[in-house]
Amino acid sequence: MKQKKNEMYWVMGFVLAVGSIQVFGKPFAEGPYLGQTPPGPIAQVFAPGLICDLRPHQWESGGHFSADGNTFCFGRRGYVFITENTDQGWTTPKRIKSIPYKVGCCCLSPDANSIYFIRRPSNRSMRYSYDPSKRWNFHRCMRTSQGWSLPQELGPPLSLAVGGFSVAADNSICFISERGRFWVAPFVGNTWAEAIKIPVEMGNLRGCCPGIAPDESFMVFYSIRPGAQGGTETDLYLTLRRPDGTWTEPRNMGPRINSRYYEHGARISPDKKYMFFTRANGWWENSNRDTADIYWVELKEYLPESYR
């Protein structure tokens, strides 16, 4: 009898404890940008301990906010995660399970009702399983009343994309083609029209992962640092679109953003105040060696006043 009474007390205590967690537990995060103190002109890790796991051999990348700032999408060890701002604060990040495989680059649509991503080339060390006849695959998952849909492969012109990409406020998609040229595919009539070349004079740079501003007034991309061996020491570069449609010569964003590591995957916040990007010590070819975190930086000192 005593044992049964103790068991009953234990069950009641457990129920009360669970109720206490629900009632008195703190939300995952509160406030704009997950309640983080805004950075200055020196890049800082975004949401350490919340989004970014600072331990070695962890990998967070590709942070991207929706247009209203209330949904945040990012990659964690290759899988797609999402957190949303509710009346009770930000939800704990959840993996999008309808995307069952590891992906390269992911982005939200401005209204947060679509997730776009590219599946990277097959890499044995990362255990990807792809159709060997297709080198890159551009996909979309859509929000439904039952959750996120299964991935839908998008055809031309987005089938030209071979690496990182970004999404503008009007849902146009900026990407790089196999020949290393930047393109933007306008969103017209609920689909993407023929891609338009972005005429950036690259010089000796090899650009990739274009991060377009919401209004398409500037773009940040990464390039292997001139003089470095292929595949190492990447930096972020900024180019501005002039009123006549031409683009300025790309300029290195400097040591407050760039480092001796790999900077890539730039994304511009909806208000154009901040840039998010990934800093890593490798390309995640070895999960026991490579580490990456999402960083953010205020853009005020990097942009002319008319572009802010």
Image (spheres, rainbow, N blue to C red):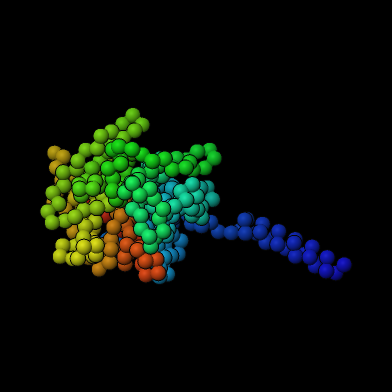
What is the quadrant of residue 190 in the picture? top left
Instruction: State the image quarter where residue 278 is shown.
Output: bottom left
Above or below 257: residue 181 = above
* Observer able to see residue 91: yes
**Residue lying farthest to the right in this orientation:** 1
Residue 280 to residue 87: above or below? below
Q: Quadrant of the N terminus?
A: bottom right
Residue 124 in percent (x, y) is at 38, 60
x, y percent for residue 43 = 30, 62
Q: In this view, does 29 lie to the left or right of 249?
A: right
Nearer to us in this view, 174 or 38: 174
* Residue at horizontal 20 percent and vertical 49 percent from the top: 180
Judged left or right of residue 228, residue 153 is right
For this rendering, which residue is in front, 41 or 201? 201
Residue at the location (70% across, 62% down)?
14
State the residue at coordinates (50%, 38%): 144
Numbered marks: total: 0
Q: In this view, does 272 lie to the left or right of 15?
A: left
Q: In which quarter of the image is residue 13?
A: bottom right
Q: Whole-percent x and y of residue 56?
A: 40, 70
In this rendering, does residue 68 appear at all? no
Residue that sits furthest to the front in the current view: 133
Nearest the eye: 214 or 181: 181
Across and down, in percent, residue 143 comes to 47, 40
Q: Which residue is drawn at 53% across and 56% down?
A: 27
